[in-house]
Image (spheres, grey):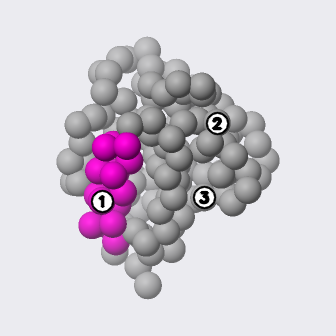
Amino acid sequence: MSLAEKIKVLIVDDQVTSRLLLSDALTQLGFKQITAAGDGEQGMKIMNEQPHHLVISDFNMPKMDGLGLLQAVRTNPATKKAAFIILTAQGDRALVQKAAQLGANNVLAKPFTIEKMKAAIEAVFGALK
């Protein structure tokens, strides 16, 4: 069993298309355990009920944005060790710095390629194969 097959991934994005693209890319990289949430609040509820190893979250969402979710994940003892990759369409340095301060493991720019996603995940977990 590859590392990718063992990692439980939570995708959090308010855009259905983005969730589908992320899920498809993860599947192509060999991930099998993928859950999706439509906003940060739903994502945190899932993390509380069933902690995942990796959260890939959009930054700009209603209710609770990606940084709010990141902060909630990091302050919860049950989820604080989860890897967190923030997804953003903005090449905003301040956002990237804030995400790093809050404990994000990586930032992935939209639109992304499968190669860039793989590199962002491998930077956190090591080689997937």
Q: Amino acid at mark 1?
A: Asp
Q: Which residues are magenta?
A: 16-30
Q: 75 or 110: nearer the eye?
A: 110
Task: Left or right? Give the position of 7 relative to 21.
Answer: right
Disc 1 on helix, strand or loop? helix
> Badge 1, how many Cα within 10 Å: few under 14, some, many 20+?
some
Identify the residue shown where x is 40% and y is 68%: 31
Task: Left or right? Give the position of 68 relative to 37.
Answer: right
- 3D distance between C-alphas at marks 1 and 2: 23 Å
Image spot of residue 54 (x, y percent): 52, 54
Task: Left or right? Give the position of 23 relative to 105.
Answer: left
> Mark 2 = which residue?
41
Quick check: is 27 in the magenta stretch?
Answer: yes
- 3D distance between C-alphas at marks 3 and 2: 15 Å
Q: Quadrant of the N terminus?
A: bottom left
Image spot of residue 96 (x, y percent): 43, 24
Point out the tag, 1 or 2, that comes first from the N-terminus.
Answer: 1
Check residue 52 in the rendering and tell me which mark sits there, or answer none: 3
Identify the residue shown where x is 69% and y is 46%: 45
Is residue 117 something one can see in this rendering?
Answer: no
Check residue 24 in the rendering and tell me which mark sits there, or answer none: 1
Identify the residue shown where x is 60% and y is 44%: 43
Which is closer to the viewer, label 3 or label 2?
2
